[in-house]
Image (tube, helix red, strand yellow):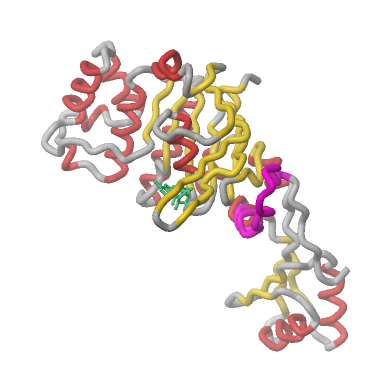
């Protein structure tokens, strides 16, 4: 596979009245061609700074970046025509229709006007193209924004938080759209903190925390590297669930109590659970492993503060020790 986007050792320090803030601290990222790549991190972890730096809107302090094999920002003029990006929510005139809006943008950007119906079709707005934008839902406005970025037929599409503020239906539409775009050969980079959706949309991810990469790879690989040691425990009806949970907690288990069961978050040896319970004549009716999802991995990784001052990427974060070994 060829890399459409490569970043290495990127550093950005903001200096303000409140002092110096390291937004990017030797950040690395690689995005391969034809992928939908999720760029994930908590608020303030450096996602927007990375995207704005890539697009030449912010000057980095150090590091190398290349888009489609061209060094940026030096060669940005040569590559800009092949990159579509939305890093700030674009403002549209509510009284214009989507068709007019895109026609004006196409005209201003020297794009063939035939692209307008094509992109409207791509984002699923063809039937509403002649309606005023002010009658659109937020999801439709987001799709119009994507349409505007697609006018010049980019090879790489960069979207900052495209699912932000969308309801589940809007997120589903956005997900379908991303899949369609990648299916047409485009590479899509999308930043987000909505992880459940990312797991379904993306082929690969980069997770950033405090300006450094803490995980990267295919969603399956990232998940496989962080197998959960949690198990769900259900007891026979009528048994004192809270009492049993308390007893395990006193023995060192990390317990989360649900309505009709509890989970043990650090059960590296599930037999210990059944043994301790059986010693008190309490019998389990279900003991099931809880599989890790991207959200678990994200919390585990971004809750792990990187070593201060070290620029090494901490992809290989060790898993925490389990209880009951
Ligand atoms: N113009 C600025 N001046 C000073 N500090 C800034 C500036 N822009 C961002 N920062 C700081 O840099 C860090 C990274 O911010 P950035 O906006 O890149 O994060 P983010 O991951 O995009 O967060 P969010 O998801 O909230 O948008 C934060 O600590 C932020 O407060």
Q: Main secondary structure of the magenta part?
A: loop
* Residue 238 in sight in this render: no
Specify whether residue 308 is painted magenta.
yes
First to last magenta residue range = 298-315
Q: Quadrant of the C terminus?
A: bottom right
Tell whether 235 sits left or right of 211: right
Residue at point 87% right, 85% down? Answer: 279
Asked whether 91 or 62 is in front, the reply is 62
Asked whether 210 or 222 is in front, the reply is 210
Residue at point 64% right, 74% down? Answer: 256
Tell whether 151 sits left or right of 128: right
* Residue 76 in sight in this render: yes
Specify whether residue 103 is painted magenta.
no
Occupied quadrant, residue 302 = bottom right
Q: Is residue 121 above or below residue 224?
A: above
Q: How many marks?
A: 0
Residue at point 15% right, 39% down? Answer: 94
Occupied quadrant, residue 301 = bottom right
Provide residue 278's location: percent of width, then percent of height. 85, 82
Q: Quadrant of the N terminus?
A: top right
Residue at point 68% right, 41% down? Answer: 220
């Amino acid at each position: 596979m060829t890399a459409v986007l490569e970043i290495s050792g990127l550093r950005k320090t903001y200096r303000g009245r409140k002092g110096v803030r390291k937004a990017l601290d030797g950040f690395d990222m690689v995005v391969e061609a034809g992928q939908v790549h999720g760029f994930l991190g908590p608020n303030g972890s450096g996602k927007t700074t990375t995207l704005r730096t890539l697009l030449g809107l912010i000057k980095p302090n150090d590091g190398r970046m290349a888009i489609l094999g061209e060094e940026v920002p030096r060669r940005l003029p040569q590559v800009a025509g092949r990159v579509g990006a939305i890093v700030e929510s674009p403002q549209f005139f509510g009284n214009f229709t989507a068709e007019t809006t895109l026609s004006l943008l196409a005209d201003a950007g020297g794009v063939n006007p035939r692209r307008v119906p094509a992109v409207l079709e791509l984002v699923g707005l063809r039937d509403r193209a002649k309606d005023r934008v002010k009658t659109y839902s937020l999801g439709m406005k987001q799709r119009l924004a994507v349409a505007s970025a697609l006018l010049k037929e980019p090879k790489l599409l960069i979207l900052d938080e495209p699912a932000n503020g969308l309801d589940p239906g809007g997120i589903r539409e956005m997900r379908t759209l991303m899949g369609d775009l990648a299916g047409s050969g485009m590479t899509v980079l999308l930043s987000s903190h909505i992880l459940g959706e990312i797991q379904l949309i993306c082929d690969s991810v980069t997770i950033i925390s405090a300006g450094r990469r803490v995980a990267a790879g295919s969603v399956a690989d990232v998940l496989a590297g962080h197998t959960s040691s949690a198990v769900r425990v259900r007891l026979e009806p009528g048994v004192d669930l809270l009492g049993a949970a308390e007893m395990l907690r006193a023995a060192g288990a990390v317990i989360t109590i649900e309505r009709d069961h509890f989970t043990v978050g650090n059960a590296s040896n599930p037999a210990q659970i059944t043994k301790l319970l059986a010693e008190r004549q309490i019998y389990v009716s279900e003991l099931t492993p809880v599989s890790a999802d991207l959200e678990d991995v994200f919390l585990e990784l971004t809750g792990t503060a990187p070593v201060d001052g070290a620029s090494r990427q901490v992809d290989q974060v060790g898993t925490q020790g389990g209880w009951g070994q």
